[in-house]
Amino acid sequence: MLDLGFVRTNLELVEKKLRERGQDPAALLGDFRELDLRRRERITEAEQLKAQRNKLTEEVARLKKSGQDASAPMDETRALKTRMDELETAAAESETELRAILTRIPNLTRDEVPVGSSEQQNVEVKRWGTIPEYSFQPKPHWELGAQLGILDLERAAKISGARFAVYWGDGAKLERALIGFMLDLHTREHGYTEVLPPFMVNSKSLFGTGQLPKFAEDLFRCTDAEGLVPGEYRDNDHWLIPTAEVPVTNLYRDETLDEAKLPILLTAYTPCFRSEAGSYGKDVRGIIRQHQFQKVELVKFTRPEDSDVEHEKLTRNAETILERLGLPYRRMLLCTGDTGFSSAKTFDLEVWLPGQNLYREISSCSNFDAFQARRANIRYKPKGQGKTAFVHTLNGSGLAVGRTWLAILENYQQADGSVRVPDALVPYMGGQRMIESRAGA
């Protein structure tokens, strides 16, 4: 969420940044200027009346002490108190309306973010690896998985519906191996602390990271979260997490962090649950877009002056996974129209999928500046300063496990339909180097 004072003094900049995102400033900001002016006028009038009341109170005390009649100034004092209460109530109502406006304004993208309306205007920053060549026509992962007997979408649909998957044998083993490999690399080499958070969160947590109220339809809610109205965020309802970003970032909600401990680096494996509202008809083949999938997440809490450097480090941490697995990828700087609601700047990592002859997103690495920290009230106390400040938060997938799984199948497929295990994963597969067809699935 943006700071009220910042929006007030930089309204033209905010409007410009909204237009760069493809948003309508009038629709998002509404009557912000009038509401803010009215609120400040009421606060100013209330303060003036308070000063008058204080003087009258002194006058009442003087009259009473001298034995004189104080009924007139007492009546005036009561009238002033009534008017002050009315003004304070009106100012509070304006504050609530302003806050509602602020909650729907997306973060302001950095100046270096390219202006564009869709992924077509994203800018390629780098490319790594050599696109593999085959003496045969490479197959997509859904064909390979079915032929190997390790991916079962039909039985998943039977027990859960569309956009779910069952992994058999070496398919389940490969998924587990990837999780272990990613967590070990991030904790042993990159300095992250592993955390295993709850897989359900309350609406306060989802507000803190920016999923609520705007993206409620993308989430799975439990029955105790039914009936939630905009602006109402509870601590006793439950939603399935769309990403570990939500519980891990909210670990420090309403806390003031020790500056000496910054940056704080956390990594977490969790399943993720997304309704994929509005995505039907897209990526219907295979496991690209699922209601349930696994992910290893990277989350950082930093001082504002360090967040750009830490953003680059986080992105490199995610890239290292791809490089160790020998998976060709490219890094894309997202344009304004493709940057997420809470993000100020995002790099997408896209892995090469030979079975589909395209690059596909496998990680988004974002710097949120103070946007999430202000919503979740996560602060630190800068050295030598009396006041606290908001930290900067960052996160990225390190990586999406299912998409890494399918990228391995497609990039390491052999002419006979088997799949070679990347060298980095062999220890996690118990020394196994090949995935071959299994019977009985």
Image: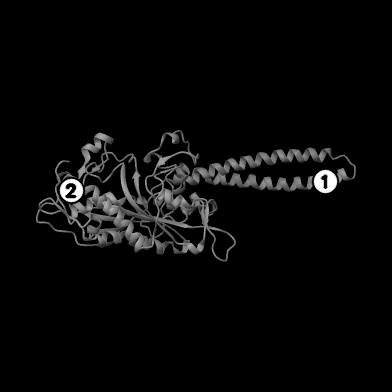
User: Where's residue 18, x and y in %?
Assistant: 43, 50
- For the point 63% across and 46% down, the residue is 41
In the image, 6 versus 255, the foreground residue is 255
Q: Which residue is mark 1?
A: 59
| Amino acid type, mark 1 | Glu
- For the point 47% across and 55% down, the residue is 370
User: Where's residue 143, x and y in %?
Assistant: 16, 45
Can you tell which of label 1 and label 2 is closer to the viewer? 2
Q: Which mark is residue 412?
A: none
Q: Are marks 1 and 2 in contact (CB under 8 Å)?
A: no
Q: CA distance from mark 1 to mark 2?
A: 87 Å
Q: Is residue 159 above or below residue 259?
A: above
- The answer to whether 168 appears left or right of 64 in the picture is left
Q: Which quadrant of the rendered structure holds the C terminus?
A: top left
- The answer to whether 115 appears left or right of 202 in the picture is left
Kind of element beneath mark 1? helix
Which residue is situated farthest in the right direction here?
67
Q: Residues within 10 Å of mark 1 (few under 14, many from 20)?
A: some
Which corner quadrant of the image does residue 70 belong to?
A: top right
Sequence-earlier tag: 1 or 2:
1
| Amino acid type, mark 2 | Pro
